[in-house]
Image (cartoon, rainbow, N blue to C red):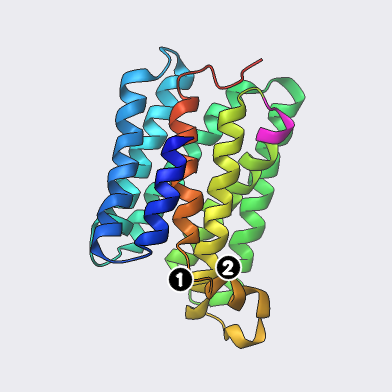
Amino acid sequence: MAGLCLCALFLLIYPGGELCRLFEYALVILCFAFACGHRSETLDGLLSLLALLCTAGADFFLVALKEEQWLPGLSLFCVAQLFWALRLLRMEAGRRRFVHGLTWALTCGTLLVVAVIAVRGGDPVLLLSAVYVSLLLTTVLFSWLTPRNLLFTLGMTLFLGCDLFVAANNAVLYLDLDAFPLLKALHDIPFNMMWAFYGPSQMLLALSSAGDGGER
Protein backbone atom coordinates (compact mmCIF):
# COMPACT_ATOMS: atom_id res chain seq x y z
CA MET A 1 0.00 0.00 0.00
CA ALA A 2 2.85 2.38 0.85
CA GLY A 3 4.40 1.69 -2.56
CA LEU A 4 1.15 2.50 -4.35
CA CYS A 5 0.78 5.76 -2.41
CA LEU A 6 4.34 6.81 -3.22
CA CYS A 7 3.78 5.95 -6.88
CA ALA A 8 0.61 8.07 -7.00
CA LEU A 9 2.34 10.96 -5.20
CA PHE A 10 5.25 10.92 -7.63
CA LEU A 11 2.96 10.94 -10.64
CA LEU A 12 1.01 13.84 -9.15
CA ILE A 13 4.16 15.92 -8.60
CA TYR A 14 5.85 14.91 -11.85
CA PRO A 15 3.07 14.26 -14.39
CA GLY A 16 5.54 14.23 -17.28
CA GLY A 17 9.08 14.92 -18.37
CA GLU A 18 12.42 13.12 -18.31
CA LEU A 19 12.46 12.36 -14.58
CA CYS A 20 9.00 10.83 -14.67
CA ARG A 21 9.88 8.72 -17.72
CA LEU A 22 12.94 7.29 -15.97
CA PHE A 23 10.97 6.61 -12.81
CA GLU A 24 8.28 4.81 -14.79
CA TYR A 25 10.76 2.50 -16.48
CA ALA A 26 12.61 1.87 -13.23
CA LEU A 27 9.31 0.72 -11.72
CA VAL A 28 8.83 -1.84 -14.51
CA ILE A 29 12.38 -3.15 -14.04
CA LEU A 30 11.88 -3.42 -10.27
CA CYS A 31 8.72 -5.46 -10.79
CA PHE A 32 10.62 -7.84 -13.08
CA ALA A 33 13.49 -8.04 -10.55
CA PHE A 34 11.01 -8.85 -7.78
CA ALA A 35 9.54 -11.68 -9.84
CA CYS A 36 13.05 -13.03 -10.51
CA GLY A 37 13.66 -13.39 -6.80
CA HIS A 38 10.21 -14.32 -5.51
CA ARG A 39 8.32 -16.20 -8.22
CA SER A 40 6.99 -19.64 -7.43
CA GLU A 41 9.04 -22.55 -8.80
CA THR A 42 6.22 -23.66 -11.09
CA LEU A 43 5.26 -23.23 -14.72
CA ASP A 44 2.91 -20.42 -13.61
CA GLY A 45 5.85 -18.62 -12.04
CA LEU A 46 7.91 -19.03 -15.20
CA LEU A 47 5.08 -17.73 -17.42
CA SER A 48 4.73 -14.71 -15.13
CA LEU A 49 8.46 -14.03 -15.32
CA LEU A 50 8.45 -14.25 -19.13
CA ALA A 51 5.43 -11.92 -19.31
CA LEU A 52 7.13 -9.35 -17.08
CA LEU A 53 10.34 -9.67 -19.13
CA CYS A 54 8.43 -8.97 -22.36
CA THR A 55 6.69 -6.06 -20.64
CA ALA A 56 10.06 -4.60 -19.65
CA GLY A 57 11.21 -5.04 -23.25
CA ALA A 58 8.08 -3.37 -24.60
CA ASP A 59 8.46 -0.43 -22.23
CA PHE A 60 12.09 -0.05 -23.30
CA PHE A 61 10.77 0.93 -26.74
CA LEU A 62 7.74 2.89 -25.51
CA VAL A 63 9.05 4.50 -22.31
CA ALA A 64 12.83 4.29 -21.89
CA LEU A 65 13.61 5.61 -25.38
CA LYS A 66 12.98 9.30 -25.94
CA GLU A 67 11.36 8.51 -29.29
CA GLU A 68 8.58 5.92 -28.95
CA GLN A 69 8.93 2.85 -31.17
CA TRP A 70 5.38 1.55 -31.37
CA LEU A 71 5.86 -1.45 -33.66
CA PRO A 72 8.46 -3.37 -31.59
CA GLY A 73 6.91 -2.15 -28.34
CA LEU A 74 3.42 -3.31 -29.21
CA SER A 75 4.75 -6.59 -30.60
CA LEU A 76 6.38 -7.37 -27.26
CA PHE A 77 3.23 -6.37 -25.41
CA CYS A 78 1.31 -8.92 -27.52
CA VAL A 79 3.81 -11.62 -26.53
CA ALA A 80 3.52 -10.55 -22.86
CA GLN A 81 -0.26 -10.82 -23.03
CA LEU A 82 0.07 -14.24 -24.62
CA PHE A 83 2.15 -15.43 -21.64
CA TRP A 84 -0.43 -13.99 -19.20
CA ALA A 85 -3.18 -15.69 -21.22
CA LEU A 86 -1.37 -19.04 -21.07
CA ARG A 87 -0.99 -18.65 -17.33
CA LEU A 88 -4.72 -18.03 -16.97
CA LEU A 89 -5.54 -21.03 -19.17
CA ARG A 90 -3.57 -23.20 -16.71
CA MET A 91 -5.97 -22.04 -13.99
CA GLU A 92 -8.91 -23.32 -16.02
CA ALA A 93 -9.90 -26.77 -17.19
CA GLY A 94 -12.25 -28.65 -19.47
CA ARG A 95 -15.03 -26.78 -21.20
CA ARG A 96 -14.13 -23.38 -19.77
CA ARG A 97 -10.63 -23.62 -21.22
CA PHE A 98 -12.09 -24.43 -24.65
CA VAL A 99 -14.62 -21.57 -24.45
CA HIS A 100 -11.85 -19.20 -23.36
CA GLY A 101 -9.65 -20.13 -26.32
CA LEU A 102 -12.57 -19.87 -28.74
CA THR A 103 -13.44 -16.43 -27.36
CA TRP A 104 -9.86 -15.26 -27.97
CA ALA A 105 -9.97 -16.48 -31.55
CA LEU A 106 -13.33 -14.88 -32.34
CA THR A 107 -12.47 -11.58 -30.63
CA CYS A 108 -9.09 -11.40 -32.32
CA GLY A 109 -10.56 -12.17 -35.73
CA THR A 110 -13.33 -9.62 -35.36
CA LEU A 111 -10.99 -6.85 -34.21
CA LEU A 112 -8.55 -7.61 -37.01
CA VAL A 113 -11.33 -7.27 -39.59
CA VAL A 114 -12.46 -3.99 -38.02
CA ALA A 115 -8.88 -2.71 -37.98
CA VAL A 116 -8.30 -3.60 -41.65
CA ILE A 117 -11.56 -1.92 -42.68
CA ALA A 118 -10.75 1.15 -40.58
CA VAL A 119 -7.29 1.75 -42.02
CA ARG A 120 -7.73 0.05 -45.42
CA GLY A 121 -3.98 0.04 -45.81
CA GLY A 122 -3.27 -2.45 -43.06
CA ASP A 123 -1.53 -0.17 -40.55
CA PRO A 124 0.59 -2.73 -38.64
CA VAL A 125 0.26 -0.82 -35.36
CA LEU A 126 -3.53 -0.94 -35.52
CA LEU A 127 -3.47 -4.60 -36.52
CA LEU A 128 -1.20 -5.46 -33.61
CA SER A 129 -3.47 -3.37 -31.38
CA ALA A 130 -6.40 -5.57 -32.40
CA VAL A 131 -4.51 -8.72 -31.39
CA TYR A 132 -3.38 -7.10 -28.13
CA VAL A 133 -6.85 -5.87 -27.19
CA SER A 134 -8.41 -9.27 -27.91
CA LEU A 135 -5.93 -10.99 -25.58
CA LEU A 136 -6.27 -8.39 -22.85
CA LEU A 137 -10.08 -8.18 -22.87
CA THR A 138 -10.60 -11.93 -22.79
CA THR A 139 -7.93 -12.42 -20.12
CA VAL A 140 -9.58 -9.81 -17.88
CA LEU A 141 -13.01 -11.34 -18.45
CA PHE A 142 -11.97 -14.91 -17.72
CA SER A 143 -9.74 -13.93 -14.80
CA TRP A 144 -12.93 -12.68 -13.08
CA LEU A 145 -14.80 -15.85 -14.07
CA THR A 146 -11.94 -17.95 -12.68
CA PRO A 147 -10.67 -15.85 -9.71
CA ARG A 148 -8.08 -18.33 -8.43
CA ASN A 149 -5.43 -15.64 -7.97
CA LEU A 150 -6.89 -12.33 -6.80
CA LEU A 151 -3.68 -10.34 -7.32
CA PHE A 152 -3.49 -11.55 -10.92
CA THR A 153 -7.16 -10.63 -11.54
CA LEU A 154 -6.78 -7.15 -10.05
CA GLY A 155 -3.48 -6.58 -11.87
CA MET A 156 -4.97 -7.46 -15.25
CA THR A 157 -8.01 -5.26 -14.55
CA LEU A 158 -5.79 -2.26 -13.78
CA PHE A 159 -3.81 -3.09 -16.93
CA LEU A 160 -7.04 -2.69 -18.90
CA GLY A 161 -7.75 0.61 -17.12
CA CYS A 162 -4.34 1.89 -18.17
CA ASP A 163 -4.93 0.96 -21.79
CA LEU A 164 -8.26 2.78 -21.86
CA PHE A 165 -6.32 5.98 -21.20
CA VAL A 166 -3.62 4.98 -23.69
CA ALA A 167 -6.36 4.63 -26.31
CA ALA A 168 -7.87 7.99 -25.34
CA ASN A 169 -4.49 9.72 -25.58
CA ASN A 170 -3.73 8.22 -28.99
CA ALA A 171 -7.22 8.60 -30.43
CA VAL A 172 -6.29 12.15 -31.44
CA LEU A 173 -4.14 10.61 -34.20
CA TYR A 174 -7.19 9.02 -35.81
CA LEU A 175 -10.26 10.97 -34.65
CA ASP A 176 -11.54 14.48 -34.14
CA LEU A 177 -11.99 14.36 -30.37
CA ASP A 178 -14.48 17.25 -30.42
CA ALA A 179 -16.97 14.76 -31.84
CA PHE A 180 -16.34 12.32 -28.97
CA PRO A 181 -16.85 14.17 -25.66
CA LEU A 182 -15.98 11.18 -23.47
CA LEU A 183 -12.67 10.51 -25.25
CA LYS A 184 -11.86 14.21 -25.11
CA ALA A 185 -12.59 14.32 -21.37
CA LEU A 186 -10.31 11.34 -20.75
CA HIS A 187 -7.61 12.85 -22.95
CA ASP A 188 -7.71 16.19 -21.11
CA ILE A 189 -7.38 14.87 -17.53
CA PRO A 190 -4.41 16.82 -16.02
CA PHE A 191 -2.86 13.74 -14.40
CA ASN A 192 -0.85 10.79 -15.64
CA MET A 193 -3.80 8.39 -15.51
CA MET A 194 -2.04 5.78 -17.66
CA TRP A 195 0.66 5.23 -15.07
CA ALA A 196 -1.71 5.69 -12.15
CA PHE A 197 -3.22 2.39 -13.39
CA TYR A 198 -0.15 0.83 -14.99
CA GLY A 199 2.26 1.13 -12.06
CA PRO A 200 -0.04 -0.65 -9.58
CA SER A 201 -0.98 -3.24 -12.22
CA GLN A 202 2.66 -4.26 -12.67
CA MET A 203 3.18 -4.40 -8.90
CA LEU A 204 0.17 -6.68 -8.46
CA LEU A 205 1.16 -8.94 -11.36
CA ALA A 206 4.69 -9.24 -9.99
CA LEU A 207 3.29 -10.11 -6.55
CA SER A 208 0.95 -12.66 -8.12
CA SER A 209 3.94 -14.52 -9.55
CA ALA A 210 4.76 -15.72 -6.03
CA GLY A 211 1.68 -17.91 -6.31
CA ASP A 212 0.00 -16.92 -3.04
CA GLY A 213 -2.13 -14.03 -4.31
CA GLY A 214 -5.40 -15.34 -3.00
CA GLU A 215 -5.32 -18.66 -4.88
CA ARG A 216 -7.98 -21.11 -3.85
Q: Which residues are magenta?
A: 143-147
N-terminal of the pair, mark 2 or mark 1, is 2
Q: Is residue 112 magenta?
A: no
Task: Please tell me whether mark 2 sits on a helix, a strand or a loop.
Answer: helix
Q: Nearer the viewer, residue 68 or 126?
A: 68
User: Dividing the picture into quarters, in which one does residue 43 lie?
Assistant: top left
* Location of mark 1 (residue): 123
Quadrant housing the C terminus: top right
Instruction: Identify the image quadrant of residue 89.
Output: top right
Comparing 2 with 40, the one in front is 2
46 left or right of 135? left
Q: Which residue is mark 2?
A: 115
Magenta residues: mostly which secondary structure? helix
Is 194 above or below relative to 214? below
Left or right: 114 as drawn, with respect to 78:
right
Res. 135 visible in picture: no
The amino acid type, in three-letter code, at marker 1 is Asp
* 53 versus 94 height, above or below: below
Distance from the alpha carbon under mark 2 to that under mark 1: 8 Å
Amino acid identity at mark 2: Ala
Residue 22, quarter of the rendered image? bottom left
